[in-house]
Amino acid sequence: TRTSRPQRILKAVQRKATVGDPQSVITAIDHFCRHREWAMNVGDEKGSILDSVVNEVSPVTVLELGTYCGYSTVRIARLLPPGACVITLEFNPDYAAIARQVIKWSGLEDKVQLVEGASGDWIPWMKEHFGVQAFDLVFLDHWKERYLPDTKLLEECGLIQKGTVLLADNVICPGTPDYLEYVRNSPHYNSQYYRSHLEYTKAEDGLEKSVFLGY
Ligand SMILES: Cn1ncc2cc([C@H](O)c3cccc(CNC(=O)c4cc(-c5ccc(F)cc5)cc(O)c4O)c3)ccc21
Ligand SMILES: [Mg+2]
């Protein structure tokens, strides 16, 4: 097909959503992905759990690993107070280009820093380049085999401190067994599973919330 799926998602946003209205952007993407074409956004059901965790943590600095089309970026950014921001890492330039336009359409560009690059390359530079001390919330939604190595890298770089919350998507489907085993068995994390469904389907999936307890 001529256009890519992310391009068709952006078109659905531009046709159905109101500029400056993040909720209409979220609704437009969910409607398109439920009724036209499935896509790997966190979706409305798991998205509501994401919302409740963001509201509970009321983070000042958020790290999102895996932007894709910016759906969860918009979900997170719309709940942030002035002065708070989400840094989101996307290595795929085509996804990044679409996400920038989705985020702009929602009017949240001032709360979002989209960085084009791979998590493993950028995490060591977060302190120096963005002046981040530590993240209050990390949303993991990139390659599932990168969840564990990137969590360890965040720890090594001192970007996770007492109280930092890790929220991981897809811990059942596609699944992140090594990550789950680590956060559930580590004495340094208090972990909790939020049972839900794979976006726009009846298949089981869920989010794992892990609070760092300090060393
Ligand atoms: C290193 N680095 N740093 C930044 C960064 C960013 C990316 C990209 O954003 C990217 C590209 C491709 C895949 C992903 C991971 N997402 C998934 O694979 C996924 C799958 C499914 C699913 C479930 C059932 C199916 F049947 C098919 C797909 C449901 C979901 O919610 C997903 O998140 C993320 C990649 C590596 C990156
Ligand atoms: Mg996901």
Image: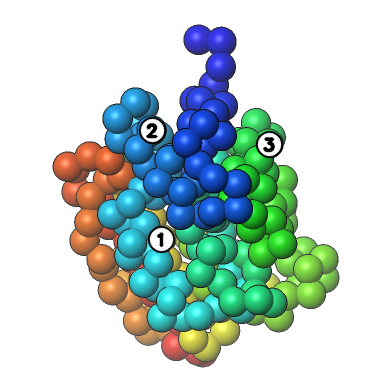
Q: Measured from the top left, where is residue 68 in percent x and y?
A: 54, 42
- Mark 2 and mark 3 lie on one chain; the one further toward the N terminus is 2
Q: As shown in the figure, which amino acid type bears the numbered disc 3?
A: Ala
Q: Are marks 1 and 3 in contact (CB under 8 Å)?
A: no
Residue that mark 2 sits on:
32
Residue that appears at 26% across and 68% down: 193
Quarter location, residue 187: bottom left
Q: CA distance from mark 2 to mark 1?
A: 24 Å
Q: Measured from the top left, where is residue 201 in percent x and y?
A: 22, 39
Q: Residues within 10 Å of mark 1 (few under 14, many from 20)?
A: many
Give the foreground label among 1 and 3. Answer: 3
Q: As shown in the figure, which amino acid type bears the numbered disc 1?
A: Ala
Q: As shown in the figure, which amino acid type bears the numbered disc 2?
A: Phe
| Numbered tag placed on residue 11 in the rendering | none
- Report whether 133 appears left or right of 5: right
Residue that appears at 28% across and 74% down: 192
Residue that mark 1 sits on:
168
